[in-house]
Image: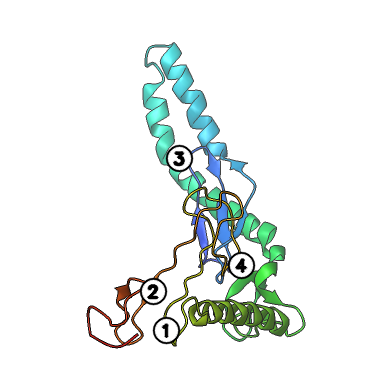
Amino acid sequence: MTLIQFVRNHNDLSTDRGFQFEFFCDRCGSGYQSTFKGSASGAITDALDVASGLLGGLFGSAASASQKIHSAAWEKQHDQEFQKAVEEVKPFFKHCKRCAKWVDEGCWNKERGLCLECAPDLEAEYSAAQTEAAVQQAHQVAQEATYVTKEKFDKTVVGACPNCGASITPGAKFCPECGQAIKRERFCAQCGSKMNADVKFCPECGAKT
């Protein structure tokens, strides 16, 4: 008796008309679909169904009886085709001896002879960790950037003129395009409340500016 391997990670797409199977990588879920194989018993049933329709049901009983024959024949061919499908796609998968998973080439560490889950690709992991660290650093720099001075909270970076929309240099007092004065916001160093530029005491907490 021949036992069939590779039976956990697959979908059976077989119908009365033929046999086809999908096999998946246990790690990433990608995979391959076997070649469609027609069913011999399905062809017999089709022929009887056509004859039954042409002759007004004369072969209706024969078509019905064929279902019982078809069932046994179909099951037998199904097992045979499944075995063939396994052999067809098996070369595209590797069996990890450590975790017993079947994985495709993309999830296989050739140098270690194990799947990437058991033996990660160190260069790929290092590259991913390096990229993640760079992203975190960029977020940290953005969060720590000083757009308002901590001492007096009296400077606000303005990237565009509120009058004409032209780009302006941080610190500019007038727009280089339309000559409009660039108004700056001022905030209380004690409570952070917005204040007018000419006040000496914060209207919210009374702190001296």
Counting residues from the N terminus, which is met first, the one under dot 4 or under dot 2?
A: 4
The residue shown at (61%, 64%) is 169
Q: Mark 1 near mark 2, Cβ–Cβ under 8 Å?
A: yes
Task: Identify the disc placed on residue 152.
Answer: 1
Q: How is the image coloured?
A: rainbow
Q: Residues within 10 Å of mark 3 (few under 14, many from 20)?
A: few
Q: Mark 4 near mark 3, Cβ–Cβ under 8 Å?
A: no
The residue shown at (51%, 45%) is 73
Q: Residue furthest top?
A: 55
Counting residues from the N terminus, which is met first, the one under dot 1 or under dot 2?
A: 1
**For the residue labelled by badge 4, is the local secondary structure a helix, a strand or a loop?**
loop
* Kind of residue at badge 2: Arg
Question: Which quadrant of the figure has residue 62?
Answer: top left
Q: Which residue has dot 2 on it? A: 186
* Kind of residue at badge 4: Thr
Q: Residue 123: percent from the left, percent from the top? A: 72, 82
Q: Is residue 159 visible?
A: yes
Q: Residues within 10 Å of mark 4 (few under 14, many from 20)?
A: few
Name the image quarter holding the C terminus.
Answer: bottom left
Task: Identify the disc placed on residue 69.
Answer: 3
**For the residue labelled by badge 1, is the local secondary structure a helix, a strand or a loop?**
loop
Counting residues from the N terminus, which is met first, the one under dot 4 or under dot 1?
A: 4
The residue shown at (60%, 72%) is 102
Counting residues from the N terminus, which is met first, the one under dot 4 or under dot 3?
A: 4
Between disc 4 and disc 1, the foreground one is 1
